[in-house]
Amino acid sequence: MASLTTYSDEARIAFDTLTGRAAGLISPSLRIGVTGLSRAGKTVFITAFIHNLLHGGRLPMFDAQKSGRISKAYLEHQPDDAVPRFQYEDHIAALVESRIWPESTRAISELRLTVEFESASAWNRLLSRGKLSFDIVDYPGEWLLDLPLLGKDYDTFCQEAMEMARLPVRAELSAEWREMASGIDPDAPADEMTARRLFEAFSTYLRACKADHRALSTLPPGRFLMPGDLEGSPALTFAPLEFEPGKKHKPGSLHAMMERRFEAYKTHVIRPFFRDHIARLDRQIVLVDAMQAMNAGAEAVTDLERALTEILSCFRQGRGNLLTGLFAHRIDRILVAATKADHIHHESHDRLQAIVRRLADRAIARADFSGAAVDVLAMAAVRATREGTVRQGKETLPVIIGTPLAGETIAGETFDGETETAIFPGDLPEKPGLIFQQKKAEDGSDSPPDHPIRFVRFRPPRLEQTAEGVTLSLPHIRLDRALEFLVGDHLA
Ligand SMILES: Nc1nc2c(ncn2[C@@H]2O[C@H](COP(=O)(O)OP(=O)(O)OP(=O)(O)O)[C@@H](O)[C@H]2O)c(=O)[nH]1
Ligand SMILES: [Mg+2]
């Protein structure tokens, strides 16, 4: 099997860790990775995290804040000069002033937030300097899904890619590429034009998966969708080929060329990303949009579970994980959080959490995961709705009230982005297992899920002011519990 990192990588990580620790003596810091597939809510989560600490938000379950032990919170220069800064000010202005959601991000970014606090225990007060920095790192989940490729050779990558492409959810989207691949002889002499054509067809298929309404999780290589400055380079111009497993291929063949490029992708893209960013994390939050997957049906749920399994296996400890030893011992807590819980009534929050628990448990079992403590949560980093009830005949229905985004429609009505409306979002199933079972209609096609959530996108909330004219901080659901799990022990 391919060795994961070179000697110099290991030396560098060790050196970074040492200097990190030395610097940590002066100013202790905690590195928190925030990931999730695209549109999962990473940028909104980080913005809300920072905003609530800077502005003393209402965080009753976050002990350090609740008990008034945080005396000061402020932004500081980030430690890594070569990483773009997380544009907190722009994002918060969009949310609070314009009431629009921040734009989609396509790259890694980082921000340092420092808090000064008083420890709850006298012993800790003696030992600790009462100052801690959080380095929050935002990166696309697609890039994380590249990590398992480090432990795979080109032939394994080809086989897995073909298997995934043939699954019923993807068969149609991948048909064109598969047809092209099946007509190409891997032993033909290497040819740039053929490589390009295959790459184009393969990445068109990956893009189609991403754009699909069923919210299919992305397949590697992650940079095929977000190439950055390596676009057009050989390391980014390859594709899986179709051939008999175990077959030997000639030097100078198309197979040999693709294999070399696959290895170059690992060396020049995945490994530096892993070494520079992932290897140094202390805590990780993985955001998932479980409701969107549930609405799309059981196959989309299974797909989300598969993506979660791959992500968790990156953080697995112990033998059998190539990535171990370099960083896994450092990440000791992982939070899997279902975002956007403000789209359902609070009576369903526990059900959503139970569903995510089931998803995570299955992923943990499949990834043979052990090591870090994993917790799950249903939350909304920014709560865009209020709750109410509506009488319909003799029944009282729980509803959520908010301002749908301009252009959203419910039952034929299109919204203007200014008008508030109440909707009955529907219930989640009581038994979490139900979301994995796809019912069939009589003609054999997939029938829609029994529990579709009526899903409209709302505008961010209008911030209320107190009688003294003080603007209150952004409302949320269970953000405080997320913070307590991610950082609470370091402020105890
Ligand atoms: N109601 C509600 N909507 C949310 C929340 N978080 C995210 N959203 C919605 O989800 C969308 C995506 O959120 P982002 O934070 O931009 O997601 P991201 O993971 O950073 O997405 P990429 O940068 O594209 O990978 C937003 O535009 C909102 O419409 C939330 O807490 N409540
Ligand atoms: Mg983002």
Image: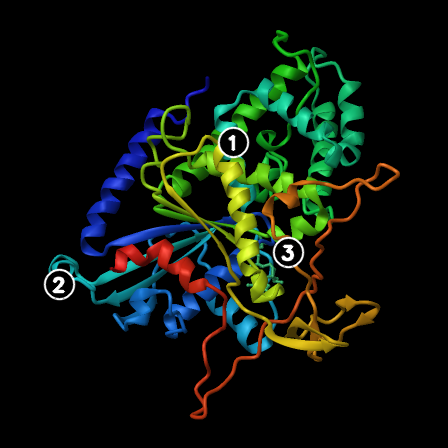
Q: Residue at x 37, y 40 (%)?
A: 372
| Count of marks, rendered view | 3
Q: Quick one: 195 or 120, which is closer to the camera?
A: 120
Q: Is residue 422 above or below residue 134?
A: below
- Residue at the spot of label 1: 366
Q: Quick one: 426 or 220, which is closer to the camera?
A: 426
> Disc 3 vs disc 2: which is toward the camera?
3
Q: Sequence-wise, which precedes: disc 1 or disc 3?
A: 1
Horizontal side, residue 487 vs residue 427: left or right: left
Q: Sequence-wise, which precedes: disc 2 or disc 1?
A: 2
Colouring of the image: rainbow
The CA distance from mark 3 to mark 2 is 46 Å
> In the image, ligand 1 is in what quadrant?
bottom right
Q: Position of residue 254 (x, y in %)?
A: 67, 16
Q: Which mark is residue 428?
A: 3
Query: Which residue is situated farthest in the right direction here?
Result: 443
The amino acid type found where label 2 is placed reads: Ala
The CA distance from mark 2 to mark 1 is 43 Å
